[in-house]
Amino acid sequence: MYVDMVTARHYEERLQEEYLEGKQPAFDISAGPIPGELHLAAGHEASAAGVCQHLRDDDTVTAPHRPHHVAIAKGVDLERMTAEIFGRETGLGKGKGGHMHLFDPDVGFACSGIIAEGCPPAAGAGLAAKKRNTDSVAVAYLGEGAIDQGAFLESLNFAAVHDLPVVFVVEDNDWAISMPKGRVTDVENGAQRAGGFDMPGVRVDHDDAVAIYDAAKEAIGRARDRNGPTLMEVQVHRRMGHFMGDPESYRPEEDQEAAAERDSIARLEADLQSHGVDEESIEELRDDAHERVEDAIAFAKDQPEPDPSAAHEDVFVNPPSGVTDTEPEYDLAGGDD
Ligand SMILES: Cc1ncc(C[n+]2csc(CCOP(=O)(O)OP(=O)(O)O)c2C)c(N)n1
Ligand SMILES: [Mg+2]
């Protein structure tokens, strides 16, 4: 868990540096080595490490627009993921998806920029596992700002009524862009939503990776044993802006300071030390993780950019005429499928 967390933290800090290159002084979102938006998850690491520790490659995870920590903990290929973020040809999506559309079927990971969008596909993966009679499970991540979204609520209902092996993980970082939680939702604890669907709901506070691990163990075990879905909410903190370039003028300074103080990594380090792991071993793990990140970034920057002529390839199932030479692969208009 510690390795996943320090890998993810260093990854975000390094991506921040790379991203800001060339974008200043007047913020130009298309400039620099990472064009487009970038949402970093520094401060969210515990939720990914604590949950994904219980998952296998044949389990499915869907994440939202802030996906890197979850992708890392799920075991997504770091080099191909980084190449994707840098828009390179050897990226997971051949450089066409960018950081919000990472997809790695080898380890069952996908994410989307549309909030709560991962919930229906996770319920679908749960339904597939049930129909295929396997013990795989699915986990859908979403932010607390998405808990009033229809896709989430409908997925909770669907998973509950069909007893699907799905765990919904709400990452509560208090903010949805510039909107504080209290202004849009009347429940303080999003896990209360579970009551309306007759499923267990559990909230874990204090950015506590070990407590998240324990709660996830129960929820994922329950799903694997075919006892149905669980809703978890975990407290995390956003240490950076909503997106890179966000001036955060809406955010009180005390809130930023509090987020920096509630560092799940420092907390886990203290835990490890209290269990007899010495500082030297912790440093060694951290150094190795940092090296892995540096290697992935160096790999990505060294990769070719996609050829412009391939821009429409793999984008449409049924390309509108004239867009590509590819013949339609599926008949969307008819048939029994
Ligand atoms: C359906 C939909 N509505 C609006 C948006 C724009 N949007 C992007 S992120 C975001 C806030 C998300 O907040 P939260 O779910 O708490 O996640 P966090 O960014 O805090 O991790 C919104 C409204 C979107 N991507 N999708
Ligand atoms: Mg949020």
Image (cartoon, grey):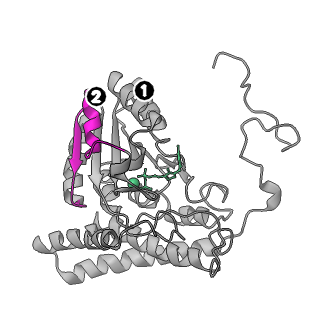
**Residue 148 in the image: above or below residue 332:** below
Residue 316 horizontal/vertical position (percent) = 73, 41
The CB of the residue at mark 2 lies under 8 Å from ligand 1:
no
Residue wearing tag 2: 196
Which amino acid type is shown beneath numbered disc 2?
Gly
For residue 254, side relative to residue 40 (left or right): left
Residue 86 in view in this figure: yes
**Residue 336 in the image: above or below residue 23:** above
**Label 1 to label 2: alpha-carbon separation:** 28 Å
For residue 302, side relative to residue 100 (left or right): right
Indicate whether residue 265 is drawn in magenta.
Answer: no
**Residue 306 in the image: above or below residue 113:** below
Q: Secondary structure at mark 1?
A: helix
Residue under the image location 34 percent in, 56 percent down: 174
Residue wearing tag 1: 132
Residue 144 horizontal/vertical position (percent) = 37, 48
- Which segment did they paint magenta? 185-208
Residue under the image location 70 percent in, 17 percent down: 335
Residue under the image location 63 percent in, 64 percent down: 36
